[in-house]
Amino acid sequence: MRGLTTVCSVELDRRRFLRTSAAAAASVVAAPHVLSGCADGQDVAALADSVTGRLILPGDPAFEWAATPHNLATNSGPPSAILFAADADDVSRALSYARDNNIPLVARGGGHSYAGYSTTPGLQVSLAAMSDVSLFGDVATVGAGAVLVTVYEQLAQSGRLLPAGSCPTVGIAGFALGGGFGFESRQYGMLSDRMCRATVVLADGSVVEATDSSEPDLFWALRGGGGGNFGIVTEFGFETSGAADVSVFQLIWNFDRAIDVFAAWQDLIATMPSELTPILKLINGAGSGSPTVQVVGQFVGSEAELRDLIQPLAAIPDLTTQSVDALSWIESVYFQAGCTGIQQCQREPVGKAGSGHAYYKSAFTREPYGNDALETAIDAVANWPLAGVTCVLEFDSYGGAINDVDPTATAFVHRDELFLCQYQAYFSGDDPFAATSARAALTDVWERLAPYNSGFSYQNYIDPLQDNWQQAYYGENLDRLIDVKTQYDPTNFFSFAQSIPVRA
């Protein structure tokens, strides 16, 4: 049995910390409350008066910015009102208000839900003001509104890290609740594996602390059961690791070398140490030139050791780009994010200033692709049919510490996989047919490769068109997740198209 033990080794003076966090959050949103307006036909003055944070309505100068999701192709808003909650009490009051007035409510962290499940025509509770990051010993206390780059920067100042993703503006909450894969995960596990506590506001407005010993079933479900299912998490505790220097690399070839590169990449990931994480990308970029094949990655070790490990890849002819560099850990964060520092990373525009449209799918694989699968993947990208739509197949190497944990130890069931393929299509919102055609074309690629995959998909890359999604995301953990959902949200208040169901 592969076990997992997560213990917060340092406990906080909770009252002192919550007072400090609430004061900091209130200072972020210090502006006059909006005392009039309607949310779904209901007067919101009472809600505005009852909270510390700021409630904004359509017409407020900040409303459009606050309401816009990262992916404009999956937007069910705009909301009727947005509450920038200052603390768990604000969230509790918002839940009570929405429940009493029969108003849909969703929580929003970073706004990156692939299916737009953090958007709503009802009341949106933004967690952005709850973004403090503190370190007590090796345990990081992180507000649920923090984005990844802010967490990285704060921890790096104390020489610590968390294994998480490369997109800088992704919110910590949704990322961790669905598992959370990043360049350090093969060495340190999924981010959900590092979670050691969570403060959760339940559907009835009560606030509980979930740990291995307090609300253990809820704590189990929060580690991989997906965001938005069981309550609204307002604060996390994570066990951090020391931030060692790393080496990074990028190799790019013309596409005629794709099958050689893919085969060599598969050979590498079958035997490589857990300190190495290489990611393979097949890219056909919107008719703007020839497709390319790339391998990018990170190694916790020296540049010389990395060069030896990737030599079979670097020896493949016709490289157009080759870089290998030794960096500090925080420098590697910015390298993988494609920005030069925290200020540039934080300026990544929400919704890409109105032009960010994408569709995503995913599939796990347990065995290396044979020739038929390799040729299918490469042909699909080489002959991508849509000019003006970029297609990317990104293959993330799993294994290592991820697979050292038993599939039932947490709700994150995907512990026997070799790699994950992200299927991505990016398009302009100016073309009214782009979304439909991109979804159809990407789904066709996914279906062509389905016979070679394990039948599982990644819940953080949640897909409204995913076949058999309950089994694909949760596998053998689904029944227990339904039990936890029924226990903590018996009226199914937290409900969306792909939420964990309540047991009948």
Image (cartoon, rainbow, N blue to C red):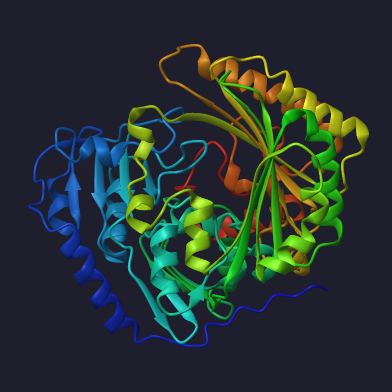
Could you say which is closer to the camera, residue 342 or residue 491?
A: 342
Quarter of the image where one finds residue 276: bottom right
Residue 460's spot in the image, x, y percent? Answer: 58, 48
- Residue 316 is situated, as x and y percent measured from the top left of the image, at 81, 43
Residue at 80% x, 53% y: name it: 418
Picture layout, residue 198 above or below residue 242: above
What is the quadrant of the N terminus in the image? bottom right
At horizontal 67% and vertical 26% (from top left) the residue drawn is 291
Q: Position of residue 156 (x, y in %)?
A: 44, 73
Q: Nearer the viewer, residue 413 or 376?
A: 376
Residue 407 visible in image: no
Residue at the outermost right position: 371
Compared to residue 478, the image places residue 215 above or below, namely below
Give the image location of residue 141, x and y in percent: 41, 74
Residue at 70 percent across and 32 percent down: it is 467
Residue drawn at the location 44% of the way across and 58% of the way down = 148
Whether residue 321 is visible: yes
Residue 44's place in the image compared with 195, above or below, is above
Residue 79 placement: quadrant = top left
In the rendered structure, the answer to whether residue 299 lies left or right of residue 403 reads left
